[in-house]
Image (spheres, grey):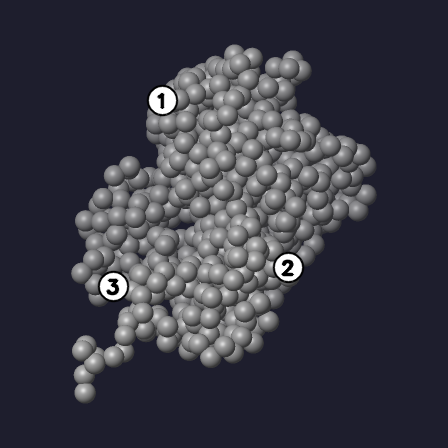
């Protein structure tokens, strides 16, 4: 077999990659618009229209397989070069690795360190490219991304000049596109900006800037932009096998398309194309083996687990980097969507479409977090609101077992039959990777196309966005400020379309915009709009059109029935289909978003490890509700006690509260189950039990009121 292989050589391609980049990136945007001679569609075609186009188009120039950041980037690059482009994804856009990142748009501080320590010019150029791409991405999607200061705490005097030199080099490599200059902080100033930081032995800190984004929404923005420029993009469209034809000139088989299956309807059809691009991330080798069973593996998957904790664990606008964890891995601790995200692990894994975070990885991250937070801050296992695992498609020698030493480089590979594979890379460089892939594809397949036109090209929602756009949403539609800010930061200039669909609340304020759950700014009209953005399942809404599943699994579970109801009405789901969607989404939350590991903190706690004094105290609290000494309490018991202190909670809510603790699911909470709960709360395994807090509050209220005599004043007659 003969293969043409185009390895990543940044020194050779940097001039091409950055030819259009200027200090004035807005000028680049204007130039990009002038160069793109492709009609822009303001109304997205429906998914059914896209499927019809896939079936009925005689031949595409390019068929891209994989709807992650790289695949969507390839589709956008191809269609803006005036190539007839198709994009298929077997699940949802960004359903894999691209939605499970650390949410950073970065050049790679640790890669620069390796480049300097090892005098590795290729790694240095990789960082340089990524920093240029960082600036471009922040410019073309300003609503979805922003600079974020990240603090690097220093606990040894000798490390201060060492780290400072490295971070300054990071600024210098970025050059004119440095977001903001890094700076050194004294111990007191560091604690002022990051009060949760451990103060013992703290010498000072260094602050540098990288970008942060909403990764799933960014991925979706790329795919939707490609669709608006005319790419035929369809999610839930699986490739069954590759199509091949015999080249009359050489007599060799050439890939000429794919047989696809609509996952929703089950119908199969063929999509013909002059060339096929494999951008399937961790599943790269699976598609390569569809082409040729003897293809060697070029991808070694690595699992990265992240956890989400309450926002009070970090300042609103300051991240933290721990460059030297106990096993040498880097841990980030970042504010994101008003929560705190911590990660990541880095360990070899098996390829799966449903990666699951393990308790071991979650506890590793928690342990590292405890190492650099103040002892005053109790880092509790119960404060993990969600957890997920993403599979990085690292390019490596198959015999290598050390994933920590692998940089996220990439290769473009063209097989003997013409299948183009783009493998490896990282989020920040998706656009440059797409450009290199299309350049190689056009050359190898002799396609008629112009140069890359994606530098400076605004993504979905970027046009029309301003930092004060949310004020217009509040004033024009009567939305809550928090909701308006969320819509502006998610949909950019298209936030008005979502606002127009919002229902009237019937309240004095807000006038429109019913929330899906009270503590998050997601509103019901976003579910309606999600269907326009090709959402096909409840999981699509929970995980990618909104980020609720990634932020709080319990809140997501609470919002799920309403989401299914709205989608069912819009898509004409039967009652059976609605139940299937509920079950599938709950399985997703339970397995992939960490609900299982979260709930097991109580269900697996069989031992009650409490001092005798506390056992007696909790028994007394329990018996304030168990008036008849039955040994268990029900919703009726709790309701009666609440009524005695003039508090009302509806029966359905009470049932949910007790169900969280009802381990054997018999409709009642036994004393033993309550003691298990309090033991788990004391150990930090459970942190937000509504029943524990409710019973404590009721007990304190009863004690404050004291015993009220039932006798009339003066004895009476």
Q: In this view, does 529 lie to the left or right of 293?
A: left
Farthest bottom residue? 717
Label 2 vs label 1, nearer the camera: 2
Marks 1 and 3, how far apart in space? 44 Å
Q: Quadrant of the N terminus?
A: top right
| Residue plotted at (28% across, 71% down) | 708
110 w.r.t. 373: above or below: above
Give the label, 1 or 3, closer to the camera. Answer: 3
Residue drawn at x 53%, y 65% as measured from the top left: 674
**N-terminal of the two: label 2 or label 1?**
1
Rendered-image quadrant of the C terminus: bottom left
Residue 243 horizontal/vertical position (percent): 69, 52
- The residue carrying mark 2 is 607
> Judging from the image, what secondary structure is the residue with disc 1 in?
loop
Question: Closer to the camera: disc 2 or disc 3?
Answer: 2
Disc assigned to residue 24: 1
Badge 2 marks a residue whose secondary structure is loop
Residue 207's x, y, as percent? 44, 23
Q: Nearer the viewer, residue 165 or 580?
A: 165
Task: Write the residue at 31% across / 51% down.
Answer: 483
Crowding at dot 1, Cα within 10 Å, few <14 / some 14-19 / many 20+, comes out as: few
């Amino acid at each position: 077999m003969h293969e043409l292989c185009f390895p990543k050589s940044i020194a050779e391609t940097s001039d091409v990659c950055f030819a259009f980049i200027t200090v004035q990136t807005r000028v680049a945007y204007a130039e990009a618009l002038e160069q793109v001679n492709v009609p822009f569609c303001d109304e997205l075609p429906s998914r059914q229209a896209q499927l019809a186009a896939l079936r009925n188009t005689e031949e595409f120039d390019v068929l891209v397989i994989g709807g992650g950041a790289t695949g969507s980037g390839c589709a956008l690059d191809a269609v803006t070069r005036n190539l007839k482009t198709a994009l298929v994804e077997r699940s949802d856009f960004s359903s894999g690795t691209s939605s499970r990142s650390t949410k950073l748009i970065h050049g790679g501080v640790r890669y620069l360190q390796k480049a300097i320590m090892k005098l590795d010019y290729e790694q240095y150029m990789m960082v340089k490219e990524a920093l240029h791409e960082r600036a471009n991405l922040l410019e073309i999607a300003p609503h979805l991304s922003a600079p974020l200061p990240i603090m690097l705490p220093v606990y040894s005097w000798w490390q201060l000049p060492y780290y400072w030199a490295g971070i300054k080099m990071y600024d210098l490599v970025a050059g004119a596109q440095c977001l903001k200059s890094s700076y050194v902080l004294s111990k007191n100033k560091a604690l002022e900006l990051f009060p949760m930081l451990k103060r013992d032995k703290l010498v000072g800190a260094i602050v540098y800037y990288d970008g942060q984004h909403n990764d799933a929404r960014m991925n979706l923005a790329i795919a939707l932009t490609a669709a608006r420029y005319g790419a035929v993009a369809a999610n839930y469209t699986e490739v069954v096998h590759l199509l091949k034809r015999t080249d009359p000139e050489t007599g060799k088989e050439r890939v000429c398309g794919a047989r696809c299956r609509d996952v929703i309807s089950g119908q199969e059809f063929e999509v013909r194309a002059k060339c096929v691009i494999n951008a399937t991330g961790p599943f790269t080798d699976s598609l390569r083996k569809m082409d040729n069973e003897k293809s060697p593996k070029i991808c070694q998957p690595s699992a990265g687990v992240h956890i989400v904790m309450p926002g009070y664990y970090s300042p609103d606008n300051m991240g933290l980097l721990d460059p030297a964890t106990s096993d040498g891995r880097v841990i980030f601790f970042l504010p994101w969507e008003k929560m705190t995200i911590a990660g990541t692990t880095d360990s070899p894994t098996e390829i799966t479409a449903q990666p699951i975070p393990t308790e071991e990885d979650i506890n590793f991250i928690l342990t590292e977090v405890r190492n650099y937070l103040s002892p005053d801050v109790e880092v509790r296992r119960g404060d993990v609101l969600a957890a997920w695992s993403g599979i990085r498609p690292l390019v490596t020698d198959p015999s290598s077992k050390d994933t920590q030493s692998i940089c996220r480089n990439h290769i473009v590979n063209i097989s003997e039959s013409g299948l183009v594979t783009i493998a490896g890379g990282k989020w920040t460089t998706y656009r440059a990777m797409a450009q290199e892939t299309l350049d190689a594809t056009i050359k190898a397949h002799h396609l008629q196309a112009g140069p890359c036109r994606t530098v400076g090209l605004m993504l979905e929602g970027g046009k029309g966005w301003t930092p004060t756009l949310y004020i217009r949403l509040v004033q024009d539609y009567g939305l809550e400020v928090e909701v308006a800010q969320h819509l502006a930061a998610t949909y950019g200039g298209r936030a008005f379309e979502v606002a127009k669909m919002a229902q009237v609340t019937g309240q004095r304020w807000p006038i429109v915009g019913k929330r899906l759950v009270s503590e998050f700014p997601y509103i019901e009209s976003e579910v309606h709009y999600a269907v326009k953005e090709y959402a096909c399942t409840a999981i699509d809404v929970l995980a990618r059109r909104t980020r609720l599943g990634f932020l709080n699994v319990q809140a997501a579970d609470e919002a799920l029935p309403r989401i299914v109801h709205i989608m069912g009405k819009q898509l004409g789901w039967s009652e059976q289909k609605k139940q299937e969607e509920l079950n599938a989404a709950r399985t997703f939350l339970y397995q992939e978003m960490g609900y299982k590991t979260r709930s097991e903190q109580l269900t697996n706690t069989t031992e009650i490890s409490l001092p005798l004094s506390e056992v007696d105290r909790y028994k007394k609290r329990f018996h304030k509700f168990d008036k008849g000494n039955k040994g268990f309490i029900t919703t009726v018991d709790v309701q009666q006690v609440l009524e005695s202190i003039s508090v009302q909670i509806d029966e359905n809510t009470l049932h949910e509260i007790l169900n969280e603790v009802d381990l054997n699911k018999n409709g009642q909470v036994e004393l033993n189950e309550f003691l298990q709960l309090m033991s788990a709360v004391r150990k930090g395994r459970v942190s937000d039990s509504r029943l524990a807090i409710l019973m404590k509050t009721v007990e304190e209220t009863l004690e404050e009121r004291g015993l009220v005599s039932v006798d009339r004043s003066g004895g009476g007659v």
